[in-house]
Image (cartoon, grey):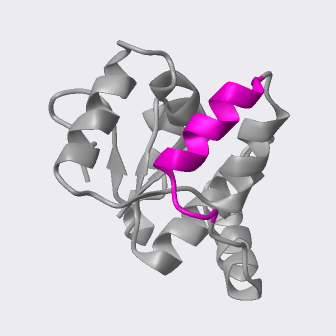
Amino acid sequence: MIHLDTGFLMSALRRGSVEDRRLREWLTQGERIGIDVVSWIEFLCGPVDAESVELATRVVDEPVALLAGDAGLAAKLFNLAGRRRGSLNDCMIAAIALRVGASIATTDLADFRRFASAGLRVVTARAAGRSPD
């Protein structure tokens, strides 16, 4: 399973983008595509139009909720990553992905690469597809 972060989803909705092509490739390969509730909230905050929301709901599964156990892991990741201002959402996204065994598809490797030591797999739209572990 691959969870899309907000940036990847927004980019993938632009027809012909690298992310659009990569997402289509994953779907053709039968890869399950999901999203967590934190990324979904960020996406809905937009700016986004109703057509984009409708298209996104056809691509991703029902957003995966943040559970109490995820909160504890997110806090641990936040502290381990240096308590960086503005990174708490990324920590929550990573915690959810780790719980469900999903990779994170992102347009910004720096946001999630720091969680590789916790077991998070990060993928991109680039040909190589995976960040160094």
Image position of 65 with respect to 13: above or below: below
- Which x, y percent locates residue 108? 49, 31
- Relative to 87, say whether 106 is above or below: above
Kindly tell me whether residue 131 is visible in this rendering: yes
Can you name the residue that lies furthest to the top here?
16
Position in image of residue 79 (x %, y %) = 70, 64
Rendered residue at 74%/70% (across/down): 75
Q: Is residue 1 left or right of residue 54?
A: left
Task: Point out the stretch of residues depicted in magenta.
Answer: 48-63
Foreground residue, 90 or 41? 41
**Number of numbered discs:** 0
Whether residue 46 sits left or right of residue 37 in the image: it is: right
Where's residue 15, x and y in %? 42, 15
Res 45 quadrant in image? top right
Q: Nearer the viewer, residue 103 or 75?
A: 103
Residue shown at the point (62%, 58%) measured from the top left? 93
Q: Residue at x 62, y 69 (%)?
A: 64
Which SS does the magenta portion mostly show? Answer: helix
Q: Is 84 above or below relative to 120?
A: above
Give the position of the N terminus as an image quadrant: bottom left
- Indicate left or right for 82 with 123 as reference: right
Q: Is residue 4 left or right of residue 16?
A: right
Q: Is residue 62 magenta?
A: yes
In front of the other: 133 or 44? 44
Residue 33 point in image, percent of width and height: 41, 55
Q: Quadrant of residue 30?
A: bottom left
For the C terminus, which image quadrant? Answer: bottom left
Q: Is residue 81 magenta?
A: no
Residue in view at x 28 percent, y 47 percent? 27
Which residue appears farthest toward the bottom when viewing the image?
69
For the residue pair 59 and 93, the one nearer the viewer reads as: 59
